[in-house]
Image (spheres, rainbow, N blue to C red):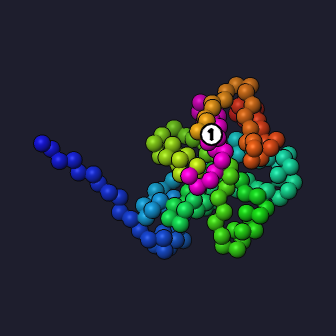
Amino acid sequence: METLVVEKKPTISKEDFFALQSQTEKVWEYNNGEITEINRMKSSELLVISKLNRKFIQTQVFKDLGELFQEVDCWLTETQMRRPDLAFFTREQILQSAEKQHPIPAFVIEIISENDNVNYTENKVLEYQHAGVQVIWHIYPELKLAKVIRGKEARYYEGSEIFDASPIVPGFQISVEELFAQ
């Protein structure tokens, strides 16, 4: 009988994680002592980000001083930090952040590339949901698809189909065609 040896990743403290972040240009996520290097957003994703931001500024939530932040540290728990590509924060949450609190965004967007591991990506969905994130968008530029996750429901959108961020950001909607049009 063979014995299976499972290699456990080395862990570091939050303090060491903060020190590491300040010493490098790399981008990391922190999960119960384990760190994972993540890819920065690519310049090829700027058009998608631009279109999303232009749609967002047309919403009432933007007029109410809510914001979409790019690659911001989101502490989902005391020991778990993720960096969604875009995260929505209300004005109140922004003020809480200024007071060194860690509010949970109710809506996040991840741009999924061919380099993203499906297990890692889906595990992040569960982590976001357990922390209180209510709406998650997965944008697939290579496939020209969008997936919207609300609770246990997930739906893919393509072509002329319009997807939205309700109920968190009413009026924030775009068709897949428009999102990926040059």
Q: Quadrant of residue 54?
A: top right
Residue 146, relative to residue 18: is it above or below? above
Q: Position of residue 93 (x, y in %)?
A: 73, 63
Counting from the top left corner in percent of width and height, residue 125 is at 55, 46
Magenta stretch: give its range.
130-151
Q: Judge whether 156 appears above or below 127 on screen.
A: above
Residue 137 lies in quadrant: top right
Q: Is residue 138 magenta?
A: yes
The amino acid on which the numbered mark 1 sits, given as a three-letter code, is: Ile
Above or below 132: residue 97: below
The answer to whether residue 20 shows anywhere in this view is no
- Residue at point 12%, 42% (across, down): 1
Q: Mark 1 — residue?
A: 149
In the visual, does 69 lie left or right of 79? right
Residue most extreme to the top: 159
Taking the image as shown, residue 172 lies to the left or right of residue 44, namely right
Question: Residue placed at 32% from the left, 57% from the top?
Answer: 8
* Residue located 76% across and 58% down the image: 90
Mark 1 closeness class: few <14, some 14–19, many ≥20 residues within 10 Å = some
In the rendered image, the residue lying farthest to the left is 1
